[in-house]
């Protein structure tokens, strides 16, 4: 939206300093809601049952509404990028992706987590490799870095073992308009940029990994808001 007198686009690009504590509180509440649900996530429960338990805790912890329905995808269904909750019952050996996005005091808060009902050596090896994408990419989370370059770093790292994903590497958090992290992005990281970093691994017909990390760019480097 532009007028002859005012261009308000910069207001929506990133939060002001006094908004940061509210956004941080939202992420802390969402992490707490998820952690409070862990005892309810077990073999024999359906994805829909687990979603209901998580949603109840999100509302109880102060969230007003949902940006999208909480996603619980398990087993082979976790290998489908951006899946939805179904009726599938959790089985031994499943990988489970839980993806939450809800409104807290007007801010869009989103995290995702990966759970294992059991883990073998092969699965652990891939999981450890996946976690390396954050370590490698986060070295570039600083003011002035072009987001298209961050996207390339993440995709090249995962591509070194033959993995790819069909969605953005990152996108704005809390309802702001930047930064977007995808191949053609010309956005740059700025002080107070808040974004979700979320590359994925999807092994067709088996399982998938997608962890969202909420990042705040500061004066010197970055902080993780969803720890």
Image: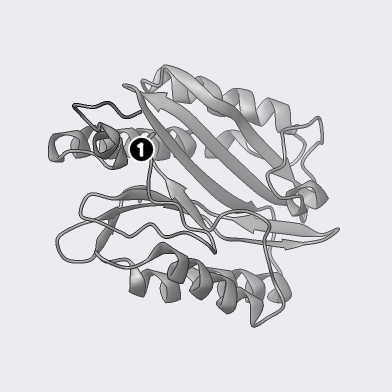
On the question of residue 37 being in view, the answer is no
Closest to the observer: 92 or 161? 161
Looking at this rendering, what residue extends furthest in the right direction? 205
Closest to the observer: 139 or 148? 148
Q: Residues within 10 Å of mark 1 (few under 14, many from 20)?
A: many
Q: In the image, 167: left or right of 176? A: right
- The percent coordinates of residue 180 (x first, y second) are 45, 52
Examine the image and state in which quarter residue 200 appears. bottom right
Q: Secondary structure at mark 1?
A: loop
Q: Residue at x 25, y 56 (%)?
A: 190
- The percent coordinates of residue 59 (x first, y second) are 45, 19
Looking at this rendering, what residue extends furthest in the front direction? 4
Closest to the observer: 67 or 36? 67
The tally of labels here is: 1
Coloration of the structure image: one colour
Q: Residue at x 38, y 51 (%)?
A: 179
Above or below, 194 relative to 159: above
Image quarter where the N terminus lies is top left
- The percent coordinates of residue 207 (x first, y second) are 75, 57
Above or below, 91 relative to 197: above
Q: Residue at x 38, y 49 (%)?
A: 195
Q: Residue at x 77, y 56 (%)?
A: 93
Q: In the image, 114: left or right of 46? A: left
On the question of residue 50 being in view, the answer is yes
Closest to the observer: 193 or 130? 193
Identify the residue under disc 1.
Answer: 176
Above or below, 212 relative to 14: below
Q: In the image, 138: left or right of 24? A: right
- The percent coordinates of residue 177 (x first, y second) are 38, 40
Examine the image and state in which quarter residue 104 appears. top left
């Amino acid at each position: 939206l532009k007028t002859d007198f005012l261009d308000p686009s910069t207001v929506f690009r990133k939060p002001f300093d006094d908004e940061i504590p509210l956004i941080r509180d939202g992420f802390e509440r969402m992490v707490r809601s998820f952690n409070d649900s862990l005892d309810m996530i077990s073999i024999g429960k359906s994805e829909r049952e687990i979603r209901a338990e998580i949603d109840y805790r999100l509302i109880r912890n102060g969230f007003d509404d949902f940006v999208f329905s909480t996603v619980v995808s398990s087993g082979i269904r976790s290998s489908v990028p951006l899946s939805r909750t179904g009726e599938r019952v959790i089985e031994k050996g499943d990988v489970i992706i839980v993806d939450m996005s809800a409104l807290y005091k007007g801010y869009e808060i989103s995290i995702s987590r990966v759970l294992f009902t059991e883990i073998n050596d092969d699965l652990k090896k891939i999981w450890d490799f996946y976690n390396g994408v954050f370590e490698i990419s986060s070295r570039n989370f600083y003011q002035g870095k072009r987001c298209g370059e961050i996207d390339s770093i993440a995709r090249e790292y995962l591509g070194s073992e033959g993995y790819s994903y069909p969605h953005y590497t990152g996108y704005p958090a809390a309802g702001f308009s930047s930064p977007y992290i995808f191949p053609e992005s010309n956005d740059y990281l700025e002080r107070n940029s808040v974004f979700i970093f979320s590359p994925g691994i999807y092994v067709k017909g088996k399982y998938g990994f997608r962890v969202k990390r909420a990042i705040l760019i500061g004066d010197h480097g970055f902080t993780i808001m969803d720890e």
